[in-house]
Image (spheres, grey):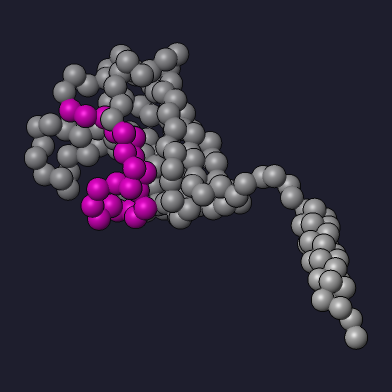
Amino acid sequence: MKGKGENMNNLKKYILFLALCSMALFTSCDDDNESVPQFGTINITINVSNAGDWPADGTVFCSLDKTWPPSGAPYKSVTLTSSQVSSGSISLTFEGLDFDTYALLSMSWRDPNDPNPQTNQHVWATHSGSPQAFWTDATPITLSPDNAELDMVLSATIN
């Protein structure tokens, strides 16, 4: 019959063996040290024609909408000013975006003399689509962990 000390010694050896096996298993796993992004980013360049015609009144926006035509406020929006135009372009970044599909990235001007929200926004640029189709034909933008950062270029004409 084995003594109490011998059983404790075997238990310690068994625990040590399990610990070594666990360490070998964890260190043999591939760890590429690349964290999976949690949010998306869109880097935006807006090439501006007629920057000298920037409106004195009203507000200019760059907006990202999940649906188009919009059914409320944009998902993400920032006010733009003429002072942001440098060498004919504006650079900005939308960060912390949900992984999702977005219908339209646009630049627009809100006419302060038109109180009707159905008609007071004048779109100057979009990432795709046509004004004839009211940009319903725009190619959707999809952000995902595999496609977490995009570079988009808009060409805007101030009018």
Q: Image quarter for residue 114? A: top left
- The residue nearer to you, when weighing 122 against 91, is 91
Residue drawn at the location 21% of the way across and 29% of the way down = 59
Please determine whether, in this image, residue 86 is positioned above or below residue 140: above
Visible residue check, residue 43: yes
Residue drawn at the location 25% of the way across and 32% of the way down = 109
Classify the position of the C terminus by image quarter.
top left
Number of numbered tags placed on the structure image: 0
* Residue 137 x/y as whole percent: 41, 53
Residue drawn at the location 25% of the way across and 55% of the way down = 71
* Residue at the limit of the structure toward the bottom, as seen here: 1
Residue drawn at the location 84% of the way across and 71% of the way down = 5
49 lies left or right of 11? left
* Residue 134 x/y as whole percent: 32, 49
63 lies left or right of 150? left
* Residue 65 x/y as whole percent: 35, 48
**Residue 138 included in the magenta stretch of the image:** no
Please determine whether, in this image, residue 48 is positioned above or below residue 40: above
Please determine whether, in this image, residue 59 is positioned above or below residue 19: above
* Residue 14 x/y as whole percent: 83, 69
Span of residues in magenta: 58-78
Q: Image quarter for residue 154? A: top left
**Residue 75 included in the magenta stretch of the image:** yes
Visible residue check, residue 14: no
Classify the position of the N terminus by image quarter.
bottom right
